[in-house]
Amino acid sequence: MKNMFRALKLFFMLVLIPTMSIACTTSKEEEPNNDIPKLDNPITVNYLQENLIKSHPRLVMNPTIQSNLKQKIETDPVVKNMYEAIKINATNILDEPLLERKKIGRRLLSVSREMLYRMNMLGMVYAMEKDEKILDRINQELLKVSNFSDWNPSHYLDVAEMAMAVAIGLDWSYADLPQETINIAEKALIEKGIEPSWINGEKNASWAKGNNNWNQVCNGGMIAASLMIAEKDPELAAKTISRALDGLPYSLEEYMPDGVYPEGSTYWGYGTGFSVVTIAMLESALGSDFGYADYPGFKESAVFRVLCNAPSGWYYNFADCGDKRGKNGDIILAWFAANTGNKEFFEKDRFLMPADKMNKLSRLDGAGLVWLSQYEEGNMNEVPIAWKGEGANPIVVFKSKEDDPHNYYFGGKGGSGTVNHGNMDGGSFIFELNDVRWVIDPGNQAYHDLEKTGFNLWSKSQDSERWTLLTKNNFGHSTITVNNQLHLVDGKSTIVDFNDGEQPYAVIDMTPTFEGLLAKAHRKFTKDSSVSILIEDDIETTDSTEIITWQLMTTSDVELVNGGAILTQDGKQLKLENISHPNLTLSVVSLDPPPLELDRHIAGLKRIELRIPASEVENKSTKIKVRLVEN
């Protein structure tokens, strides 16, 4: 029955999807793990009254931090340069119209994010210089968004980012704002920010103990708002902060044990960015982060972030990750530098780029200026060049040393489709050599473009529409497919062996991905030289096995040759050696244009396949051996 279901699903995906609409389905919400480490949580009304700093600013900055920051702007070249960039951004905002409550699809998020950016830029400049023009603009911005009809509570990320924006703008200019503005903004923080997070005034919203970035962002926004209105409504503030400290571990658990953020590197930037700014707010306002920064796996995630930056400028873009990083310095990573002293996390050269040459700054770069000012170089722990990270979406990375001209980079992974923002990509990999990404991950695609068609993007069930997309299913990844069927969505591939020696290797057990179709599927990646990667698949078949397809995704030009293929890109070449099955010819499937109209279009995308019929497998056991090497 399972095989029949899979076959029907494949037919459905390839044939029916373009011409019919499908009812949306939702997966059952998982019960949170109650055995995870907890944060300290002494929050009561009395605790807030006794410990909350009475003056402003209190969010990220307090009078002591503010005084130190002013001094560092004068004496520290990095801080001075970044502040100049913030001033340029703030000046540009003055020429922009005030924000309007305009949604894109179901989201107001772009407006909330722009407001958070504006308050970070304008607020920081005002905190340092007391410029009346800047204060007037902060006042106008606060009044405008505070008078929106609501902050779109149906999509609570919008509320959370807006609440943090208003809290920061209010806090960093509090002493000089008109009292009427303060009253209106505080009322908005309560009525449009915090109160909608309490269903019927007492029940938690679903994100409060969720295991994804919504938890970090929404709880962070509610903490910011609560710290601002604590004097006005101490009971609401206390219960909201207390709920956050109880709920945050359910998202922080995802970093355990090694810091791999299962949603990918750009979502690390999102969730972790809101975590570090929340930590900074708790410390500045209450004198403690209640164990947040030292949660198991959290600080270790800085290594994950660094290792996901490939030499080409691309990310290791698994899950719903963006493709390439910007040219500006990583302000979130800089928080880890400030809290560890490790210069590997401090992108000094990027922060010293001419201020007028930087792209538009991040919406948290104003707050980030504080931890830039707090950085002091300490004992450096080098980021490894062969690394394994366990967790819900385990990965392995091999790279070359900085002085290696080949700029070697390999990333491989396990995991399952049920991971937040996950794909059917267990066993997949990417590969770079000589500044060329030869093996690609198809990456993410714009959510709204899919959602506006009625597409059900977010269900993680086996029959979800999500898995019809090339960016999400196994047909769009460099992995193995059996019988032309989808991977099992909850079949988790795990790293079962790893060695970081002279020829580092990792073994991924993919067997659960193919339940019933294969008796065993172990994939071994070995960096067997400075210019090659060896992929070995140890396969045991079952009576249900019909065909095994070895896949490689690339945008390179491909020439099939005896014993493999030659890939050409940017005037360079890579050889694919079909070591184990030279009697079988590779094939190339063009995916430009892609199979579905809704698929992401990637110029030149193609899938190289080695298709092995079950008849080629003797005694139900075979080893597929392919090597990629500089040509």
Image (spheres, rainbow, N blue to C red):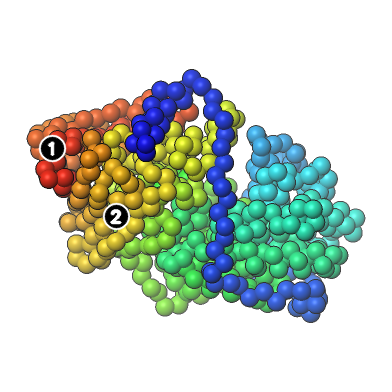
Quadrant of the image for the N terminus?
Answer: top left
Residue found 19% across the figure and 62% down from its top: 503
Q: CA distance from mark 2 to mark 1?
A: 22 Å
The quadrant where residue 11 appears: top left
2 lies left or right of 143: left
Q: Position of residue 445 (x, y in %)?
A: 48, 37
Q: Is residue 227 left or right of residue 493?
A: right
Crowd tier of the residue under label 1, counting other residues whose Cα lies within 10 Å: few below 14, some 14–19, many 20 or above: few
Q: Considering the numbered disc 1 on the image, is that residue within a helix, a strand or a loop?
A: helix
Percent x, y of residue 160: 69, 53
Name the residue nearer the viewer: 165 or 542: 542
Which residue is under mark 1? 616
Q: Nearer the viewer, residue 570 or 90?
A: 570
Disc 2: which residue: 509
Secondary structure of the residue carrying numbered label 2: strand
At label 2, the amino acid type is Asp
Residue 356, visible in the rendered structure: no
Give the farthest residue toward the top.
19
**Residue at far bottom of view:** 50
Determine whether 422 is above or below 341 in the image: above
The amino acid marked with disc number 1 is Glu
* Res. 222 mark: none
How many neighbours does mark 2 have within 10 angstroms: few (below 14), some (14-19), or many (20 or more)?
A: many
- The residue located at (58%, 50%) in the rendering is 29
Looking at the image, tell me whether mark 2 or mark 1 is earlier in sequence order: 2
